[in-house]
Image: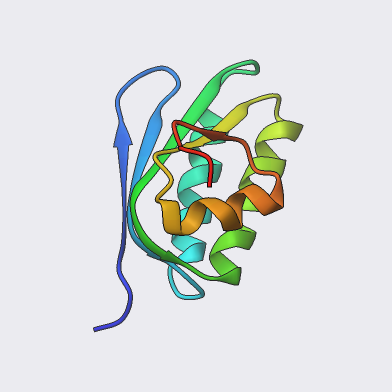
Amino acid sequence: MGPQLTIVYLPGDPCSLAVCGEIDIYTAPHLEVGLHHAVLSASPGAAITADLSAVSFIDARGLTALVEAEAYAIVRGVALVFAGVPASITRLLTITGLRLRGIAPF
């Protein structure tokens, strides 16, 4: 069985997402669709939170998905905030300049 990724939409306006599993070349397209859906459903000025606390791995393709989703959110006037980022992934995301919330500095 290959890598698994689960996305749970949390109720609210705008919606938030909880992401669980591995974000890699196989699962990144699924995440992209989920994040784009959340951004499209949000009003300009809204803030969407993507909880990554249950993400165990991210590769370059997964990182690309997050960077592109954040760029898409900015164009639409929506804040996309990545929360609960595991320490093992924090440094990678920080280097890219992605906005992070709720994490300890490395």
Percent across and percent down for residue 3 are 33, 75
Q: Please tell me which residue is depicted at 53% across the width and 40% down the height of the picture.
A: 105
Q: Please tell me which residue is depicted at 30% across the width and 31% down the height of the picture.
A: 10
Q: Please tell me which residue is depicted at 54% across the width and 64% down the height of the picture.
A: 62
The front one of 76 and 49 is 49
Question: In the rendered image, which quarter is residue 21 located in?
Answer: bottom left
The front one of 97 and 103 is 103
Percent across and percent down for residue 29 are 51, 63
Instruction: Residue at the far front: name it.
Output: 106
Q: Which colour scheme is used?
A: rainbow
Number of marks drawn: 0
The front one of 69 and 94 is 94
Percent across and percent down for residue 85 are 43, 45
Instruction: Residue at the far left: name it.
Output: 1
Quadrant containing the N terminus is: bottom left
Locate residue 85 relative to residue 66 in the image: left or right.
left
Instruction: Residue at the far bottom: name it.
Output: 1
Percent across and percent down for residue 100 are 55, 36
Q: Please tell me which residue is depicted at 76% across the width and 33% down the height of the picture.
A: 75
Question: In the rendered view, would you say 59 is above or below 37?
Answer: below
